[in-house]
Image: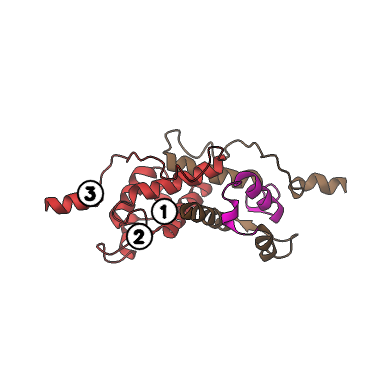
Chain colours: A brown, B red
Amino acid sequence: MFAQGVSRPSEELSHAPRSCPTPLGTCPPPELTDVERAIETVISQFHCYAVKGQKEYLTPNEMQELVVQKLPHLGKCVGPLEEKIECMGDPNEAKLEFGEYWDMMGDAAKGCRRK
Amino acid sequence: MFAQGVSRPSEELSHAPRSCPTPLGTCPPPELTDVERAIETVISQFHCYAVKGQKEYLTPNEMQELVVQKLPHLGKCVGPLEEKIECMGDPNEAKLEFGEYWDMMGDAAKGCRRK
């Protein structure tokens, strides 16, 4: 059990935001525009939370953790998290890849625009 | 001609970035997270450039202007702008709505991740 806990640290939902360095530090030059920095931020948080999937995908718990911690004001625009997690299928196999994560952030953005 | 120039200021491509206030100033509370601020930035730039469409859509020229000015390092990940503009159809009628704009930003993000 301990070994499982160590190998899947993100499977226990925490309410403390993660502190992660920007993983794209070597990618964008320093003179990024505000929009490019914004895109980089959204990417970096995906990488930060995608621990089990090694920056390739979020597990349902990682997704939930990210939404709770990083979208406290816009999370409701994403829709009910329980439904979203159910739609992902078997929790031990389910993966939210980057494109789906970007779409989810788009739902939050559309919700914010409607306010 | 002058009247046309006044009514459609965005139809002449400029290389000077626009300076716009955050249009969602009344929407999000001040304690936004970094991800929420990033989403707000991407939204605000859409609103800033969507002059003709009154924050509802970008014309082809407005889209081009935004990509040139705001995505100088990631714009190539969006793909050839000329092709994108052609795909939008008649330049006098073509509209890029917010959802399509968000998808375009997603292409830039995916390109950045691949770097």
Check disc 3 and report its element: helix, strand or loop: helix
What chain letter is assigned to the residue under label 1? B
- Residue ID for mark 2: B84
Whether marks 2 and 1 lie on the same chain = yes
Which comes before the other along the chain, label 3 or label 1? 3
- For image coordinates 41% across by 45% down, the residue present is B23
Front-most of A54 and B94?
Answer: B94
In terms of secondary structure, where does tag 1 sit? Answer: helix
Closest to the camera, between mark 3 and mark 1, is: 3
Q: Label 1 near label 2: C-beta < 8 Å?
A: yes
Residue A23, percent across and down? Answer: 58, 39
Mark number, residue A57: none
Q: Position of residue B73 (x, y in %)?
A: 41, 43
User: Residue A25, located in which quarter of the rendered image?
Assistant: top right
Q: Residue at x 43, y 43 (%)?
A: A35
For disc 3, the chain is B
> Please, which chain is the residue tagged with disc 2 on?
B
Q: Amino acid at mark 3?
A: Pro
Between marks 2 and 3 in the image, the one whose residue lies nearer the viewer? 3
Badge 3 vs badge 1, beta-carbon distance below 8 Å:
no
Using the numbered discs, state the Cα–Cα distance from disc 2 to disc 1 in whole angstroms: 9 Å
Left or right of A12, for residue A77: left
Q: Is residue A50 visible?
A: no
Q: Position of residue B42 (x, y in %)?
A: 45, 47
- Real-space Cα separation, disc 2 to disc 3, in angstroms: 21 Å
| B100 vs A8: above or below | below
Query: Dot 1: few (<14), some (14–19), or many (≥20) neighbours within 10 Å?
Result: some
**The quarter of the displayed image where residue B54 is located:** bottom left
Residue type for callout 1 = Val
In the drawing, what numbered circle is on residue B78?
1
Residue A66 painted magenta? yes
Sequence-wise, which precedes: disc 2 or disc 3?
Answer: 3
